[in-house]
Image (cartoon, grey):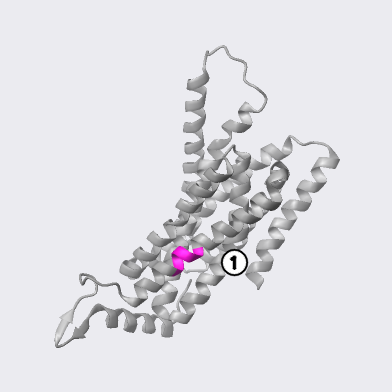
């Protein structure tokens, strides 16, 4: 979120104003006083409500309408994750003015990090079952795909953390801008969280477990809001890199784990719905960001 000069001046004025309050001739530092600054309270409330609303909305839609077609809807989540990463998060990061080479290095590092996380999960699985002499059922490998579920939670937590920083930046610049930013984040988070729920259900998570873990990940937005409030001058420079790292996770999961599952469906009758649903996922993200 690149700032204009006027926006930066408004932020500096608000930041300086909240540093010290006068009460009956005494100077009170809100960082140590036993009360919460109204701006901080707004940031905490906005990040918490945005997380709960987006997670609950996505859960209601996923569980009520998609539970019977989870396997097919993996294609929808691929479209949503790729479009969110490639059409929104990465362009925003590269438009921030951060060093392009450093951002690409972060993207490479993120892809390699998620590859190593998956490799560790595969090695642990191989060691656990090596030489056990048991024949595993056909659904066993699908259930073991839960590693993709844990990776999607990690990437989602990073994304929520960035959202919290963005909400804090908006509230510090202007309270009205903070409210609008929080509403916009809810709007784009719901389709993304639907994709996350689909991945988690496909990976073997129960409905309750998927909801609880997604809800816990949403609390990262509160942590991001706190960090943004107290250290925004330094943390704002990290936002593009956090966006790129989170995007690398979504791209890796979509291309490495979900698309290979879709390739197993080789008939034309199965392939056409996949392509249509990928396109629908992309269209949803494009439409929301255009709005």
Q: Residue at x 73, y 44 (%)?
A: 69
Q: Residue at x 39, y 77 (%)?
A: 172
Residue under pointer 1: 187
Q: Is residue 49 magenta?
A: yes
Q: Nearer the viewer, residue 238 or 145?
A: 145
Q: Is residue 268 left or right of residue 249?
A: right
The percent position of residue 138, horizontal first and vertical second, equals 67, 25
The percent position of residue 156, horizontal first and vertical second, equals 51, 52
Magenta-drawn stretch, dominant element (helix, strand or loop):
helix
Quadrant containing the C terminus in the rendered view: bottom right
Q: Residue at x 63, y 47 (%)?
A: 198
Q: Residue furthest bottom?
A: 25
In the image, which residues are magenta? 46-50
The percent position of residue 110, horizontal first and vertical second, equals 48, 48
The vertical placement of 242 against 154, above or below, is below
Q: Residue furthest right?
A: 269
Q: Is residue 286 visible?
A: yes
Q: Secondary structure at mark 1?
A: helix
Q: Exactly how many numbered labels are in the figure?
A: 1
The vertical placement of 2 against 268, above or below, is below
Q: Nearer the viewer, residue 257 or 56?
A: 56
Q: Residue at x 80, y 47 (%)?
A: 273
Q: Nearer the viewer, residue 248 or 203?
A: 203
Residue 189: quarter of image: bottom right
How dense is the environment of label 1, judged by Cα within 10 Å: few (below 14), some, or many (20 and up)? Answer: some
The vertical placement of 175 against 220, above or below, is below
Q: Is residue 266 left or right of residue 141?
A: right
The percent position of residue 221, horizontal first and vertical second, equals 44, 60
Q: Is residue 214 left or right of residue 31?
A: right
Q: Is residue 98 visible?
A: no
């Amino acid at each position: 979120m690149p700032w204009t000069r006027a926006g930066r001046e408004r932020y500096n004025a608000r930041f300086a104003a909240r540093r010290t309050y006068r009460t009956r001739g005494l100077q009170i530092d809100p960082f140590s006083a036993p009360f919460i600054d109204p701006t901080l309270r707004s940031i905490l409330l906005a990040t918490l409500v945005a997380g709960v609303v987006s997670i609950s909305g996505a859960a209601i839609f996923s569980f009520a309408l998609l539970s019977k077609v989870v396997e097919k809807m993996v294609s929808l989540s691929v479209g949503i994750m790729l479009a969110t990463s490639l059409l929104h998060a990465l362009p925003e990061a590269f438009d921030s003015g951060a060093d392009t080479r450093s951002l690409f290095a972060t993207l490479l590092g993120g892809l390699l990090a998620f590859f190593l996380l998956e490799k560790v999960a595969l090695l642990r699985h191989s060691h656990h079952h090596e030489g056990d002499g048991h024949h595993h059922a056909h659904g066993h490998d699908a259930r073991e795909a839960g590693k993709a579920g844990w990776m999607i939670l990690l990437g989602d937590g990073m994304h929520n953390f960035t959202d919290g920083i963005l909400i804090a930046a908006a509230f510090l610049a202007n309270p009205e801008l903070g409210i609008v930013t929080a509403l916009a984040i809810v709007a784009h988070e719901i389709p993304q969280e639907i994709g996350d729920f689909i991945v988690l259900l496909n990976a073997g998570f129960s409905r309750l477990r998927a909801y609880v873990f997604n809800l816990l990940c949403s609390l990262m937005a509160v942590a991001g809001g706190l960090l943004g409030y107290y250290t925004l001058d330094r943390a704002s420079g990290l936002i593009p890199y956090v966006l790129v790292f989170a995007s690398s996770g979504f791209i890796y999961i979509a291309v490495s784990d979900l698309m290979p599952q879709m390739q197993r469906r080789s008939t034309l009758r199965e392939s056409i719905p996949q392509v249509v649903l990928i396109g629908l996922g992309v269209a949803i993200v494009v439409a929301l960001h255009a709005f």
